[in-house]
Image (cartoon, rainbow, N blue to C red):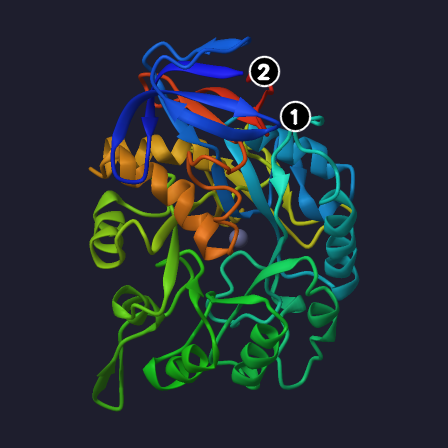
Amino acid sequence: MIIKNGRLVMPDEILPADIAIENGRISEIGNNLAGEAIFDANGMYVCPGFVDIHAHGGGGADFLDGIDAFDTALRFHATWGVTSMLPTSITAPIEIITDFISNIRTQKKSDPAAHRRARIIGAHIEGPYLSQKNKGAQPESWLRIPARDPYDFLLYGADVIRTVTLSPELEGAVEMVRRLTKAGIIVCAGHDNGRKSTIIPSIEAGVSHLTHLWCAMSTVAMYDGVREPGLCEIGLVDDRLTAEIIADNHHMPPELVQIAYRCKGAKKLCVVSDCLRAGGMPCDGHIWALGPKRARLTDFIVSDGVARLPDNTRLAGSIQTVGQMVGNLARYCNIPLTDAVRMASLTPAEIIGAERDIGSLTVGKRADICILDNELKPCAVFIDGININIERE
Ligand SMILES: [Zn+2]
Protein backbone atom coordinates (compact mmCIF):
# COMPACT_ATOMS: atom_id res chain seq x y z
CA MET A 1 0.00 0.00 0.00
CA ILE A 2 1.22 3.49 -0.84
CA ILE A 3 0.22 6.82 0.73
CA LYS A 4 0.95 9.30 -2.04
CA ASN A 5 1.30 13.05 -2.40
CA GLY A 6 1.59 13.83 1.28
CA ARG A 7 3.56 16.42 3.13
CA LEU A 8 5.30 14.22 5.69
CA VAL A 9 5.71 15.77 9.11
CA MET A 10 9.14 14.57 10.22
CA PRO A 11 10.74 15.54 13.56
CA ASP A 12 12.76 18.35 11.95
CA GLU A 13 11.19 19.12 8.59
CA ILE A 14 8.17 18.82 6.35
CA LEU A 15 9.01 16.51 3.47
CA PRO A 16 6.89 16.12 0.32
CA ALA A 17 7.04 12.34 -0.26
CA ASP A 18 5.20 9.03 -0.52
CA ILE A 19 5.16 6.24 2.07
CA ALA A 20 5.12 2.54 1.22
CA ILE A 21 3.67 0.10 3.75
CA GLU A 22 4.28 -3.63 3.93
CA ASN A 23 3.09 -6.03 6.60
CA GLY A 24 1.94 -3.18 8.82
CA ARG A 25 5.31 -1.44 8.80
CA ILE A 26 6.73 1.51 6.88
CA SER A 27 8.88 -0.11 4.19
CA GLU A 28 10.00 2.89 2.15
CA ILE A 29 9.82 6.69 2.04
CA GLY A 30 10.54 8.42 -1.26
CA ASN A 31 9.11 10.00 -4.38
CA ASN A 32 7.08 8.37 -7.13
CA LEU A 33 6.69 5.11 -5.23
CA ALA A 34 4.60 2.55 -7.10
CA GLY A 35 2.32 -0.12 -5.65
CA GLU A 36 -1.10 -1.69 -5.71
CA ALA A 37 -3.38 0.14 -3.31
CA ILE A 38 -2.99 3.91 -3.34
CA PHE A 39 -4.26 6.41 -0.80
CA ASP A 40 -3.99 9.95 -2.14
CA ALA A 41 -3.07 12.35 0.68
CA ASN A 42 -3.63 15.20 -1.71
CA GLY A 43 -0.98 17.55 -0.31
CA MET A 44 -2.22 17.19 3.27
CA TYR A 45 0.01 16.70 6.32
CA VAL A 46 0.95 13.08 6.93
CA CYS A 47 1.93 12.63 10.58
CA PRO A 48 2.99 9.71 12.73
CA GLY A 49 0.01 8.40 14.73
CA PHE A 50 -0.33 10.29 18.00
CA VAL A 51 0.64 8.80 21.35
CA ASP A 52 -1.35 9.77 24.45
CA ILE A 53 0.31 8.76 27.72
CA HIS A 54 -2.40 10.16 30.02
CA ALA A 55 -6.10 9.59 29.29
CA HIS A 56 -8.93 8.34 31.50
CA GLY A 57 -11.52 7.64 28.86
CA GLY A 58 -13.70 9.17 26.17
CA GLY A 59 -16.80 8.52 24.10
CA GLY A 60 -18.83 8.10 27.32
CA ALA A 61 -16.56 5.45 28.89
CA ASP A 62 -13.95 5.59 31.67
CA PHE A 63 -11.27 2.89 31.65
CA LEU A 64 -12.18 2.17 35.28
CA ASP A 65 -15.74 1.20 34.30
CA GLY A 66 -14.53 -2.27 33.35
CA ILE A 67 -13.51 -4.28 30.33
CA ASP A 68 -16.36 -3.06 28.10
CA ALA A 69 -15.12 0.51 28.38
CA PHE A 70 -11.93 -0.23 26.46
CA ASP A 71 -13.38 -0.54 22.95
CA THR A 72 -15.44 2.62 23.36
CA ALA A 73 -12.68 4.85 24.73
CA LEU A 74 -9.85 3.51 22.55
CA ARG A 75 -12.02 3.82 19.45
CA PHE A 76 -12.96 7.40 20.29
CA HIS A 77 -9.30 8.43 20.61
CA ALA A 78 -8.38 6.58 17.39
CA THR A 79 -10.91 8.65 15.42
CA TRP A 80 -8.80 11.66 16.37
CA GLY A 81 -5.52 10.15 15.17
CA VAL A 82 -4.35 8.71 18.49
CA THR A 83 -2.91 5.29 17.66
CA SER A 84 -1.16 4.37 20.93
CA MET A 85 -2.15 5.10 24.53
CA LEU A 86 -1.57 4.56 28.20
CA PRO A 87 -5.08 4.19 29.66
CA THR A 88 -4.97 5.95 33.03
CA SER A 89 -6.59 5.26 36.39
CA ILE A 90 -7.50 7.80 39.06
CA THR A 91 -7.37 7.51 42.84
CA ALA A 92 -9.85 4.76 43.74
CA PRO A 93 -10.25 1.75 46.05
CA ILE A 94 -7.41 -0.73 45.44
CA GLU A 95 -9.77 -3.44 44.09
CA ILE A 96 -10.84 -1.10 41.32
CA ILE A 97 -7.25 -0.29 40.38
CA THR A 98 -6.21 -3.96 40.41
CA ASP A 99 -9.22 -4.82 38.21
CA PHE A 100 -8.09 -2.09 35.84
CA ILE A 101 -4.55 -3.52 35.76
CA SER A 102 -5.81 -7.01 34.93
CA ASN A 103 -8.10 -5.59 32.22
CA ILE A 104 -5.07 -3.83 30.71
CA ARG A 105 -3.25 -7.18 30.74
CA THR A 106 -5.94 -8.89 28.65
CA GLN A 107 -6.91 -5.93 26.46
CA LYS A 108 -3.30 -5.21 25.54
CA LYS A 109 -3.23 -8.48 23.59
CA SER A 110 -6.08 -7.58 21.27
CA ASP A 111 -5.29 -6.38 17.74
CA PRO A 112 -5.86 -2.60 17.53
CA ALA A 113 -6.36 -2.40 13.75
CA ALA A 114 -8.91 -5.23 13.76
CA HIS A 115 -10.89 -3.40 16.45
CA ARG A 116 -10.32 0.02 14.86
CA ARG A 117 -9.02 1.39 18.14
CA ALA A 118 -5.83 2.79 19.63
CA ARG A 119 -3.15 0.35 20.75
CA ILE A 120 -2.53 -0.11 24.47
CA ILE A 121 1.15 0.25 25.34
CA GLY A 122 0.55 -0.18 29.07
CA ALA A 123 -1.15 1.46 32.03
CA HIS A 124 -0.59 4.81 33.70
CA ILE A 125 -1.55 4.66 37.38
CA GLU A 126 -2.33 8.19 38.60
CA GLY A 127 -2.65 8.05 42.38
CA PRO A 128 -3.65 7.04 44.95
CA TYR A 129 -0.29 8.18 46.48
CA LEU A 130 -1.00 11.89 46.02
CA SER A 131 -1.03 14.94 48.27
CA GLN A 132 -4.24 16.09 49.95
CA LYS A 133 -3.59 19.69 49.08
CA ASN A 134 -3.12 19.25 45.33
CA LYS A 135 -5.36 16.26 44.84
CA GLY A 136 -7.22 18.23 42.16
CA ALA A 137 -10.34 16.29 41.26
CA GLN A 138 -9.07 12.99 42.71
CA PRO A 139 -11.35 11.62 45.45
CA GLU A 140 -9.82 12.45 48.82
CA SER A 141 -11.04 9.48 50.85
CA TRP A 142 -8.99 7.01 48.77
CA LEU A 143 -5.65 8.84 48.90
CA ARG A 144 -2.81 6.77 50.40
CA ILE A 145 0.62 7.33 51.94
CA PRO A 146 3.52 5.10 50.81
CA ALA A 147 4.98 4.64 54.32
CA ARG A 148 1.65 3.41 55.71
CA ASP A 149 -0.30 1.88 52.85
CA PRO A 150 1.33 -1.01 50.96
CA TYR A 151 1.88 -0.60 47.22
CA ASP A 152 2.77 -4.22 46.37
CA PHE A 153 -0.18 -4.30 43.95
CA LEU A 154 1.79 -1.92 41.73
CA LEU A 155 4.89 -4.12 41.81
CA TYR A 156 2.74 -7.16 40.91
CA GLY A 157 1.42 -5.17 37.94
CA ALA A 158 4.88 -4.11 36.74
CA ASP A 159 4.53 -6.27 33.60
CA VAL A 160 1.88 -3.89 32.23
CA ILE A 161 2.28 -0.68 34.24
CA ARG A 162 4.38 1.80 32.26
CA THR A 163 4.06 4.85 34.51
CA VAL A 164 2.94 5.76 38.03
CA THR A 165 2.20 9.31 39.17
CA LEU A 166 2.91 10.01 42.85
CA SER A 167 3.64 12.99 45.11
CA PRO A 168 7.35 13.04 45.93
CA GLU A 169 7.06 14.65 49.38
CA LEU A 170 4.84 11.99 50.96
CA GLU A 171 6.31 9.90 53.76
CA GLY A 172 7.99 6.86 52.18
CA ALA A 173 7.79 8.26 48.63
CA VAL A 174 11.54 8.20 47.99
CA GLU A 175 11.72 4.51 48.85
CA MET A 176 8.64 3.89 46.70
CA VAL A 177 10.28 5.67 43.74
CA ARG A 178 13.32 3.42 44.16
CA ARG A 179 11.28 0.23 44.28
CA LEU A 180 9.06 1.14 41.33
CA THR A 181 11.98 2.20 39.10
CA LYS A 182 13.82 -0.99 40.03
CA ALA A 183 10.75 -2.90 38.81
CA GLY A 184 11.02 -1.08 35.47
CA ILE A 185 8.17 1.40 36.06
CA ILE A 186 8.64 5.03 35.01
CA VAL A 187 7.85 7.27 37.97
CA CYS A 188 6.17 10.62 37.39
CA ALA A 189 5.72 13.36 39.97
CA GLY A 190 2.51 15.34 40.23
CA HIS A 191 -0.51 16.31 42.31
CA ASP A 192 2.16 17.25 44.87
CA ASN A 193 2.63 19.62 47.77
CA GLY A 194 6.44 19.56 47.76
CA ARG A 195 9.23 22.10 47.95
CA LYS A 196 12.81 21.94 46.74
CA SER A 197 14.14 20.11 49.79
CA THR A 198 11.47 17.40 49.59
CA ILE A 199 11.42 17.09 45.79
CA ILE A 200 15.13 16.70 44.92
CA PRO A 201 15.59 13.36 46.80
CA SER A 202 12.84 11.79 44.73
CA ILE A 203 14.47 12.95 41.47
CA GLU A 204 17.73 11.47 42.68
CA ALA A 205 15.83 8.25 43.44
CA GLY A 206 14.48 8.04 39.89
CA VAL A 207 11.52 10.37 39.19
CA SER A 208 11.93 11.24 35.51
CA HIS A 209 8.69 12.84 34.32
CA LEU A 210 6.19 15.46 35.52
CA THR A 211 2.46 14.91 35.28
CA HIS A 212 0.46 17.81 33.80
CA LEU A 213 2.87 20.66 34.44
CA TRP A 214 1.25 23.57 36.33
CA CYS A 215 -1.96 21.68 37.02
CA ALA A 216 -2.32 20.47 40.64
CA MET A 217 1.41 21.06 41.15
CA SER A 218 3.49 22.84 43.80
CA THR A 219 5.00 26.17 42.83
CA VAL A 220 7.38 28.78 44.30
CA ALA A 221 6.57 29.79 47.91
CA MET A 222 8.18 31.38 51.01
CA TYR A 223 9.20 29.11 53.89
CA ASP A 224 10.42 30.99 57.03
CA GLY A 225 11.53 33.92 54.93
CA VAL A 226 13.28 31.79 52.30
CA ARG A 227 11.87 31.42 48.82
CA GLU A 228 11.93 27.85 47.48
CA PRO A 229 10.92 26.64 44.03
CA GLY A 230 8.20 24.02 43.75
CA LEU A 231 7.93 21.04 41.42
CA CYS A 232 6.87 23.26 38.56
CA GLU A 233 9.97 25.48 38.53
CA ILE A 234 12.31 22.57 39.24
CA GLY A 235 10.74 20.65 36.38
CA LEU A 236 11.14 23.55 33.95
CA VAL A 237 14.91 23.78 34.44
CA ASP A 238 16.05 20.29 35.47
CA ASP A 239 17.17 18.50 32.30
CA ARG A 240 16.79 15.09 33.93
CA LEU A 241 13.03 15.57 33.78
CA THR A 242 10.55 15.37 30.92
CA ALA A 243 7.09 16.90 31.33
CA GLU A 244 3.60 16.85 29.87
CA ILE A 245 1.03 19.58 29.32
CA ILE A 246 -2.73 19.50 28.77
CA ALA A 247 -2.98 21.70 25.67
CA ASP A 248 -6.76 22.05 25.50
CA ASN A 249 -6.70 25.88 25.64
CA HIS A 250 -8.34 25.70 29.10
CA HIS A 251 -5.86 24.08 31.49
CA MET A 252 -2.96 26.14 30.18
CA PRO A 253 -3.14 29.63 28.69
CA PRO A 254 -0.84 30.00 25.65
CA GLU A 255 1.73 31.98 27.68
CA LEU A 256 2.29 29.02 30.03
CA VAL A 257 2.53 26.61 27.10
CA GLN A 258 5.19 28.91 25.63
CA ILE A 259 7.17 29.04 28.89
CA ALA A 260 7.13 25.24 29.11
CA TYR A 261 8.10 24.92 25.43
CA ARG A 262 10.95 27.41 25.72
CA CYS A 263 12.34 25.76 28.86
CA LYS A 264 12.00 22.11 27.91
CA GLY A 265 11.93 22.14 24.10
CA ALA A 266 9.91 19.71 21.97
CA LYS A 267 12.22 16.82 22.87
CA LYS A 268 11.38 16.94 26.57
CA LEU A 269 7.83 18.23 26.57
CA CYS A 270 4.86 16.22 25.37
CA VAL A 271 1.17 16.88 25.10
CA VAL A 272 -1.42 14.68 26.86
CA SER A 273 -5.20 14.75 26.81
CA ASP A 274 -6.07 13.86 30.43
CA CYS A 275 -9.38 13.19 28.68
CA LEU A 276 -12.38 12.14 30.76
CA ARG A 277 -15.37 10.03 29.72
CA ALA A 278 -17.16 13.16 28.47
CA GLY A 279 -14.69 13.51 25.58
CA GLY A 280 -16.64 13.50 22.34
CA MET A 281 -20.03 13.50 24.05
CA PRO A 282 -22.75 16.14 23.77
CA CYS A 283 -22.48 17.46 27.28
CA ASP A 284 -23.36 20.98 28.27
CA GLY A 285 -24.39 20.99 31.90
CA HIS A 286 -24.57 17.19 32.22
CA ILE A 287 -23.16 15.65 35.42
CA TRP A 288 -20.78 12.72 34.85
CA ALA A 289 -18.99 10.19 37.07
CA LEU A 290 -15.25 10.80 37.38
CA GLY A 291 -13.71 7.32 37.53
CA PRO A 292 -15.73 4.10 37.69
CA LYS A 293 -19.49 4.31 37.14
CA ARG A 294 -20.15 1.39 39.51
CA ALA A 295 -18.59 3.16 42.55
CA ARG A 296 -19.55 6.77 42.13
CA LEU A 297 -16.45 8.30 43.76
CA THR A 298 -16.88 11.84 42.53
CA ASP A 299 -18.64 13.82 39.80
CA PHE A 300 -17.78 16.44 37.24
CA ILE A 301 -19.69 18.78 35.03
CA VAL A 302 -18.82 20.08 31.58
CA SER A 303 -19.24 23.69 30.63
CA ASP A 304 -17.54 25.88 28.05
CA GLY A 305 -15.57 22.95 26.68
CA VAL A 306 -13.85 21.84 29.88
CA ALA A 307 -14.63 19.53 32.82
CA ARG A 308 -14.92 21.03 36.30
CA LEU A 309 -15.91 19.79 39.74
CA PRO A 310 -19.63 20.47 40.25
CA ASP A 311 -18.86 23.29 42.74
CA ASN A 312 -16.79 24.96 40.00
CA THR A 313 -13.66 25.18 42.21
CA ARG A 314 -11.33 23.09 40.06
CA LEU A 315 -10.74 21.80 36.57
CA ALA A 316 -11.25 18.04 36.48
CA GLY A 317 -9.60 17.09 33.17
CA SER A 318 -10.12 17.75 29.50
CA ILE A 319 -12.73 16.60 27.00
CA GLN A 320 -10.34 16.80 24.05
CA THR A 321 -7.92 14.38 22.44
CA VAL A 322 -4.24 14.77 21.61
CA GLY A 323 -5.36 14.83 17.96
CA GLN A 324 -7.15 18.12 18.63
CA MET A 325 -4.33 19.50 20.79
CA VAL A 326 -1.76 19.41 17.98
CA GLY A 327 -3.86 22.04 16.22
CA ASN A 328 -4.13 24.06 19.43
CA LEU A 329 -0.33 24.13 19.83
CA ALA A 330 0.28 25.19 16.24
CA ARG A 331 -2.53 27.72 15.94
CA TYR A 332 -2.84 29.32 19.36
CA CYS A 333 0.55 28.74 21.02
CA ASN A 334 2.80 29.69 18.13
CA ILE A 335 4.62 26.35 18.05
CA PRO A 336 5.95 25.15 14.66
CA LEU A 337 3.94 22.22 13.28
CA THR A 338 6.96 19.86 13.27
CA ASP A 339 7.43 20.47 17.00
CA ALA A 340 3.70 20.31 17.78
CA VAL A 341 3.52 16.91 16.06
CA ARG A 342 6.73 15.72 17.76
CA MET A 343 5.23 16.64 21.14
CA ALA A 344 2.28 14.39 20.33
CA SER A 345 4.20 11.46 18.84
CA LEU A 346 7.95 10.89 19.10
CA THR A 347 8.45 12.66 22.45
CA PRO A 348 5.73 10.75 24.35
CA ALA A 349 6.92 7.52 22.67
CA GLU A 350 10.44 8.24 23.95
CA ILE A 351 9.18 9.09 27.43
CA ILE A 352 7.59 5.64 27.76
CA GLY A 353 10.42 3.83 25.94
CA ALA A 354 8.38 2.83 22.87
CA GLU A 355 10.23 4.88 20.25
CA ARG A 356 11.77 1.91 18.46
CA ASP A 357 8.34 0.82 17.35
CA ILE A 358 6.19 3.95 17.11
CA GLY A 359 6.34 7.77 17.20
CA SER A 360 7.78 8.81 13.84
CA LEU A 361 7.55 8.15 10.11
CA THR A 362 10.62 5.93 9.91
CA VAL A 363 11.29 2.87 7.78
CA GLY A 364 10.82 -0.22 9.96
CA LYS A 365 8.42 1.37 12.46
CA ARG A 366 4.73 0.51 12.65
CA ALA A 367 2.67 2.20 9.95
CA ASP A 368 0.62 4.19 12.47
CA ILE A 369 -0.30 7.34 10.58
CA CYS A 370 -2.63 10.30 10.99
CA ILE A 371 -3.42 12.64 8.12
CA LEU A 372 -4.33 16.22 9.03
CA ASP A 373 -6.43 18.40 6.76
CA ASN A 374 -5.63 22.04 6.09
CA GLU A 375 -7.30 23.02 9.36
CA LEU A 376 -5.03 20.53 11.17
CA LYS A 377 -7.94 18.24 11.90
CA PRO A 378 -7.36 14.47 11.66
CA CYS A 379 -9.16 13.20 8.54
CA ALA A 380 -7.67 9.72 7.97
CA VAL A 381 -6.03 7.30 10.39
CA PHE A 382 -3.99 4.17 9.73
CA ILE A 383 -3.09 1.62 12.40
CA ASP A 384 -0.51 -1.01 11.44
CA GLY A 385 -1.03 0.18 7.87
CA ILE A 386 -4.79 -0.38 7.91
CA ASN A 387 -7.11 2.55 7.18
CA ILE A 388 -9.60 2.46 10.06
CA ASN A 389 -12.08 4.65 8.15
CA ILE A 390 -12.86 7.11 10.88
CA GLU A 391 -16.30 8.55 11.34
CA ARG A 392 -16.93 11.24 13.89
CA GLU A 393 -20.18 12.78 15.06
ZN1 LIG B 1 -5.32 12.50 34.96
Distance of mark 2 from mark 1, alpha carbons?
8 Å
- Front position in the image: 243 or 274: 243
Judge left or right: residue 224 versus residue 120.
left
Counting other residues with Cα less than 10 Å from the Cα at mark 1, is it few (<14), some (14-19), or many (20 or more)?
many
| Residue, disc 1 | 116
State the residue at coordinates (41%, 77%). Answer: 203
**Disc 1: residue Cβ within 8 A of ligand 1's nearest atom:** no
Q: Earlier in the sequence, mark 2 or mark 1?
A: 1
Residue 211 position within the rendered picture, expressed as x and y whole percent measured from the top left: 45, 59
Which quarter of the rendering shows the C terminus? top right
Type of residue at label 2? Asn
Residue 207 position within the rendered picture, expressed as x and y whole percent measured from the top left: 46, 72
Q: Secondary structure at mark 1?
A: loop
Residue 367 position within the rendered picture, expressed as x and y whole percent measured from the top left: 52, 30
State the residue at coordinates (62%, 27%). Answer: 23
State the residue at coordinates (59%, 67%). Answer: 185
Judge left or right: residue 144 versus residue 81.
right
Image height check: is 42 above or below 63? above
The answer to which image quadrant residue 385 occupies is: top right
- Front position in the image: 218 or 313: 218
Which quarter of the rendering shows the N terminus? top right
Q: Residue 188: give its label.
A: none
State the residue at coordinates (58%, 15%). Answer: 389
- Front position in the image: 29 or 93: 29
Q: Residue 389: give its label.
A: 2
Image height check: is 312 above or below 30? below
Image height check: is 117 above or below 306? above
Type of residue at label 1? Arg
Residue 143 position within the rendered picture, expressed as x and y whole percent measured from the top left: 62, 70
Judge left or right: residue 12 versus residue 250.
left
Give yes or no for contact between labels 2 and 1 (Cβ–Cβ under 8 Å).
yes
